[in-house]
Image (tube, grey):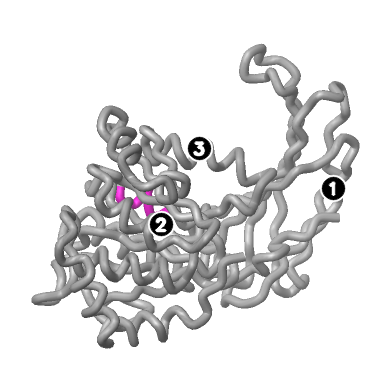
């Protein structure tokens, strides 16, 4: 699991230290469309934090992609996506040295399609969660907000999001909305890590940078925006209760909707064989976050060649909770 417990201190030290100036000088002759200071900070962050799974939303001509790939650790991977890059990015990446090509995967898809596909992958392969995301896609508010929310949902606890172009209203307002929904997160901007950014809906401080970094807590936060947890089940599994493995937060009550699904591998072709059972409960701090289902939740085994998946959606009306990242939900 990606953990960067020293990241806040490092960000502040690096911002004001000589290494940052050295990185900027190192990239001075590189043709970049993103400001050199921002790319230098991003590359140094990657080199320091050593993320294994990195995503770039908005490839454009791949200049930043290449610098990111160069900074990745051994075994690290970069996925860069751009729905309009299918005719230009493959040839650009093909011109890179073999070592960089092998680290980089380009997909000509929207962020919506990417996260929809990733949602299916991480159920069976949680190690495919992202460690670091560079968000530089559509800068209109609803798209920027989606990219931040979706990236956060598929981010390893302790991971980071770097959001570009906060001088524009869309990304800036998206960050402010996200932090309202996620009070356990912090933001790095202009050399300081804070709970609330120094910029506002009105604009940036004079001379401030045009990018910001969102730092996730090292535990999983559940707030007023619903948070989904999924796992693989098995035929005949019977679920009677759920316990939230709470590590912190100030909420007293959490609403939970639990479901179990079974469907054959060819369901997307035939539309036949879907089974589902579900239950809704309320988990309370006073009950040690354990709630019994009104009746056992299970589905029958009708097909040996089938997917079995459970899903728990949590929402909190007031406050937030932090859950253990290794086992956030306990089922019995």
Q: Is residue 157 left or right of residue 42?
A: right
- Of tags 1 and 3, which is closer to the observer? 3
In the picture, residue 83 is in which quadrant? top left
Helix, strand or loop at disc 3?
Answer: helix
Magenta residues (range): 144-150
Q: Is 147 contained in the magenta span?
A: yes
**Left or right for 136, reference 208:** right
The local crowd at label 3, few if under 14, some if 14 to 19, many if 20 or more residues have their Cα within 10 Å, is few
Q: Quadrant of the C terminus?
A: bottom right
Give residue 7's position: percent from left, percent from top: 45, 79
Rendered position, 160 above or below 197: above
**Is 157 drawn above or below residue 80 in the view shown?**
below
Left or right of residue 332, residue 225 in this image: left
Q: Secondary structure at mark 1?
A: strand
Q: List the residue tagged with mark 1.
A: 239
Task: Please report whichever mark, 3 or 2, sits nearer to the chain's N-terminal start.
Answer: 3
Question: Going 41% across and 38% down the picture, which residue do you hit?
Answer: 112
Does residue 123 appear in the picture of this structure? yes
Q: Which residue is mark 3?
A: 116
Classify 40 as above or below 83.
below
- Mark 2 neighbour class, 10 Å CA radius: few under 14, some 14 to 19, many 20 or more: many
The reply to whether residue 155 is in sight is: no
Asked which secondary structure carries label 2, the reply is strand
Answer whether labels 1 and 3 touch (C-beta < 8 Å): no
Residue wearing tag 2: 133
């Amino acid at each position: 699991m990606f953990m960067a417990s020293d990241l806040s201190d490092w960000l502040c030290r690096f911002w004001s230290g000589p290494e940052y100036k050295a990185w900027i000088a190192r990239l001075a002759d590189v043709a970049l469309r993103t400001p050199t200071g921002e790319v230098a900070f991003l590359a140094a962050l990657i080199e320091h934090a050593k993320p294994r799974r990195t995503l770039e939303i908005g490839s454009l001509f791949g200049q930043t992609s290449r610098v990111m790939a160069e900074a990745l650790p051994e075994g690290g991977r970069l996925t860069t996506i751009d729905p309009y890059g299918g005719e230009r990015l493959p040839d650009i990446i093909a011109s890179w040295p073999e070592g960089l090509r092998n680290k980089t995967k380009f997909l000509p898809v929207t962020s919506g399609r990417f996260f929809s596909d990733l949602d299916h992958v991480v159920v069976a392969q949680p190690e495919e969660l992202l460690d670091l995301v560079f968000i530089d896609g559509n800068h209109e508010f609803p798209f920027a907000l989606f990219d931040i929310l979706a990236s956060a949902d598929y981010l390893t606890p302790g991971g980071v999001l770097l959001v570009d172009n906060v001088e524009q209203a869309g990304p800036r307002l998206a960050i402010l909305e996200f932090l309202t929904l996620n009070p356990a997160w912090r933001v790095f901007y202009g050399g300081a890590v804070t709970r609330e950014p120094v910029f506002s809906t009105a604009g940036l401080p004079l001379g401030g940078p045009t990018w910001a970094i969102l730092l996730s807590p090292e535990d999983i936060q559940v707030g007023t925006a619903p948070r989904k947890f999924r796992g693989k089940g098995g035929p005949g599994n019977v679920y009677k209760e759920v316990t939230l493995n709470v590590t912190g937060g100030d909420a007293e009550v959490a609403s939970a909707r639990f479901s179990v699904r079974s469907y054959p591998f060819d369901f997307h072709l035939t539309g036949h064989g879907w089974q589902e059972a579900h239950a809704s409960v309320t988990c309370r701090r006073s009950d040690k976050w354990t709630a019994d289902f009104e009746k056992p939740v299970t589905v029958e085994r009708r097909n040996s060649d089938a997917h079995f998946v459970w899903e728990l959606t949590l929402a909190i009306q007031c406050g937030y909770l932090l859950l253990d990242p290794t086992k956030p939900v306990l089922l019995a």
